Image: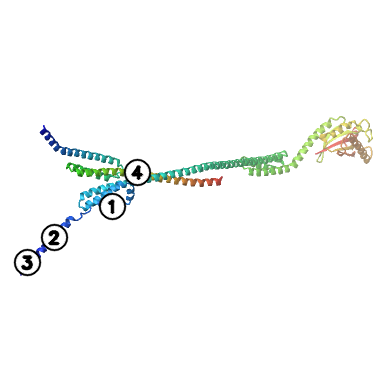
Amino acid sequence: MTRYATMFLFLAFLAVPVMARAGEADDLQRQIDYLKQTTTDLERQDDQKSVASDIMMMRAWLDNGWTLRSQEKYDEVRIILDRCEAQANMVRQRLTAAKLSAQAAVKEDEVKRARGQLSRTKKALENAKIQKARLEGKV
Amino acid sequence: MKTAVIGRSAMTTVFRASLLCVFAASLLSLGCATPPKPRELDALEKLRANPEMPAARKKAPDLCKKADKAFGAATDKWHSNDLNESVNHALLGQIYYQHALSLADQDKSNARIAEAEDALSATAEEHEKVQKDLDDTNEKIGLLQKNVHKDEEMKALEAQMAADKKANDDKLSQEKLRAETADKVSDAELAVKTAETVNAAKYAPELYKSAAQILAKAQNEMQAGQMQQAQSSAGIAKKTADDAAAAAKPGYSRDSQTEESRKKADGLFAEASRIPGITARRDVRGSLQRIIITVPADTLFTKKQTVLAPGRDSVLNPIADLIKKKDYQDFPVQVVGHTDSKGGAQSALLAMSGARAQSVFNALVTRGVDVRRLMASGQGGAEPIADGRTAAGRASNHRVEIVFLYQ
């Protein structure tokens, strides 16, 4: 009995690293898949194509990570995934910044139009005052 | 000699050893030399020098700290010739810096948005004020235009009224002119008719014809609306007609008086013929017509008397009435006494006939005859009406004649 238990423990001891590595590979794959999905989402959000090169680079990194994962270079894969995570965050912020910049441009355009309208109204007022003065002179 | 050889050999050995050392040192130095800087690190350095970086550091100090750390690690790894690690750190640093820059950019954009919103708000406020001013001004303009329109309408109305008045005045003037013309033409027509009353066609034919023609011309001109010409023509026609009337009047008057006198004389003769005890006859002497009422002397006088016998003068009453009658008042009347040619001197006969005429004259005056119409005379026996050789003839020649004269 003791001998079987010892054998079991020995086999288990041998199996743990194998199982652990298999779990790590799966975990990395999930992360890669998640980040790929994130990339796709970011691409969809990037309607102005302002971060297209960053997303493309991220996708290339992920492909590289996938390759390295296949080669079981998990440490390098983790480095890449960390970088991709940071890249995704950065891209989100850049997208936000681009949208805010667009909003600002729209607002500034509105200001420009409003100022133009104001200028036209002022001109109209000026003309109206002239016309009024003329009519007062006539009456 | 041997020592020299040994020395030379030792030197060669040292030399070779030196060369080997130099070669080894070279190889070592080559192996320990810093490799080329990875471009990722270069890019990271450029990113660090971004002018927006201070703002990024202020906004995201943690990120920048991480980036700085990555930059340091990348540099170290580069210096330690671990290029892969250097690149990894450099890329991570770039990401952090870009992240921080994005956050700063967001702040900047937010600030732009806020500024734009403020500007929009201020512009909208100002626009509202200006628009209000404009609306007020436009409203005033509307009122003023209304007033101007009213003023213009009033002016137009006044102009219309003035035009109407002028038209009416013109019409009145035309009517007046027409009326004046009609009056003048009527005057001319009246003048022509007046000329016709004096029979100007007979007594002044040329003038009358001319007047009639000019009058017709005036009438035509009036119908054609040529009032001035019509007035002028009517004036000429009137003057010509007046001239024609004036020219015709003497002849017409003469003829008409003669005619009238003849008619009156006819009446007088008829009435005289109806008086009993007398005879009436008509006679012409020169240009004068005469109606002679013969009263026999024995009707008025006794024998050779010159005074009217009492009771016999009643025969004079109807004669006096006849003389006084209005129709015959313009007839001069002669009372002429006649005798026969015998029975005395001519002068005596003249005296007797004159006295008898005077007696009748007085009797007529006594009966109301205007003395200015009467003229008494005696002719003696100069104008017998019967044969003086017979007594009846002589008796007839003794008479008093009441002679009415006319032309």
Q: Tell whether label 2 touches label 1 (CB within 8 Å).
A: no
Decide which of A99, A133 is in the foreground and name it.
A99
Q: Secondary structure at mark 2?
A: helix
Q: Position of residue B333 (x, y in %)?
A: 85, 37
Residue of label 1: B46
Q: Chain of mark 1?
A: B
Q: Secondary structure at mark 4?
A: helix
Image quarter of the C terminus of chain A? top right
Residues tagged by mark 1 and mark 2 found on one chain of the structure = yes
Instruction: Please give the count of numbered marks on the rendered protein.
Output: 4
* Residue that numbered label 2 is attached to: B21
- Pair 4/3: label in front: 3
Across and down, in percent, residue B367 comes to: 89, 34
State the image coordinates of residue B193 (x, y, percent, origin top left).
70, 39
Q: Which residue is mark 3?
A: B6
Q: Earlier in the sequence, mark 1 or mark 3?
A: 3
Residue identified by numbered label 4: A100
Q: Residues within 10 Å of mark 2 (few under 14, many from 20)?
A: few
Left or right of A131: which side holds B61?
Answer: left
Q: Quadrant of residue A70?
A: top left
Q: Do tag 4 and tag 3 residues touch (Cβ < 8 Å)?
A: no
